[in-house]
Amino acid sequence: RKEVEQDPGPFNVPEGATVAFNCTYSNSASQSFFWYRQDCRKEPKLLMSVYSSGNEDGRFTAQLNRASQYISLLIRDSKLSDSATYLCVGDAGNNRKLIWGLGTSLAVNP
Amino acid sequence: SQTIHQWPATLVQPVGSPLSLECTVEGTSNPNLYWYRQAAGRGLQLLFYSVGIGQISSEVPQNLSASRPQDRQFILSSKKLLLSDSGFYLCAGLRGTNYGYTFGSGTRLTVV
C-alpha cells in the first residue's frame, strides 16, 4: 500500500463547478499535511497547509480526518486557471521528509 | 522566507557524459535539502536528502550521487549518465515539517 494515495483522475469539470479531492495516508505518526499544486512542466507550489480543525483560503477548503486518515481539498467556483495537478503530502513522522501522493489531475473546461 | 535557486533550466547531455546540478538556498540557515526526480507523467521520487553539511541520505540505489559542501549548497552528480536518468530534477528545502517544502524551478534533463 502506498503511504499517500490519491485518485489520479483526471477530473474534468465545467467552470463554476465544485470539485473535491480525497487523499489517504497510512502513517499514523504523520502530523503535518499539505496540498500542493503543480502546473505542467513546472515545480510544485504550496497551495495550503491542512490543519486538524480544517482551514479555508478563498475558494479552497482543506480538511483532515485523523481517525480515518484522510485529507480532502474542496475547490468551489472552479476557474479555468485551477487546471493543474494537485498533490497531497504528509510528513514521514520523523521531521526529516515529506511523503508525496502521485497527484490528481484537474481540468476545468469553459 | 526561503528561496531555492536551481540551474540550468534545461539540459541535454549525451549518454556517458558527467552531470553536475547545483542548488543554493537563500533565506534560512541549516535547512534540510532534497533532490527529487519526476519522470514524464509520474510522481515525485526522492533521490537524496541532507540534514547538514556532509550528511547525505540516499533513498534509492542509482547512478547518481549528492554532496553538501556548504550549508546552503546541494549538488547532484553523475559520472556517466544513462538514458534512464532523463527527467525533471527538483531541489527543495524544508524549514520544518510544519511549513512544507519550497522548490527550485527545476532542471529538465534529457539524456540522448
Image: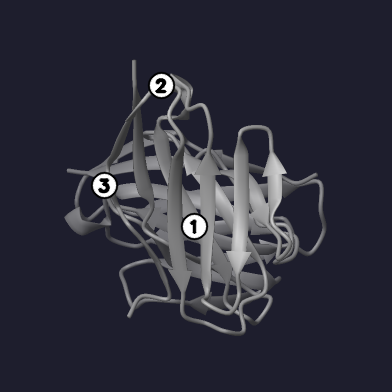
Have a look at marks 1 and 3 and say if they share a chain. no
Q: Which residue is mark 2?
A: A15
Q: Residue at x 52, y 56 (%)?
A: A72
What residue sits 45% from the left and 62% below the top? A23
The kind of secondary structure element at disc 1 is: strand
Query: Within 10 angstroms of label 3, few (less than 14), some, or many (20 or more) residues?
Result: few
Residue B8 picture location, percent across and down: 47, 36
Q: Would residue B53 be found to the left or right of residue A2 on screen?
A: right
Amino acid found under the numbered disc labelled 2? Glu
Give above or below for A110 relative to B76: above
For the residue pair A97 and B76, the one nearer the viewer reads as: A97
Q: Which amino acid does the dot numbered 3 rest on?
A: Gly
Residue type, label 1: Cys
Residue annotated with mark 1: A88
Residue A49 appears at what percent x and percent y?
67, 54
Residue highlighted by disc 3: B41
**Colouring scheme applied when the structure was drawn:** one colour
- Left or right for A75, reference B81: right
Position of the C terminus of chain B, as image quadrant, is top left
Q: Position of residue B47 (x, y in %)?
A: 43, 67
- SS for tag 3? loop
The nearer-to-camera label among 1 and 2 is 2
Chain letter for mark 1: A
Q: Does B75 sit above or below residue A107?
A: below
Q: CA distance from mark 1 to mark 2?
A: 23 Å
What residue sits 22% from the left and 56% below the top?
B16
Q: Nearer the viewer, mark 2 or mark 3?
A: 2
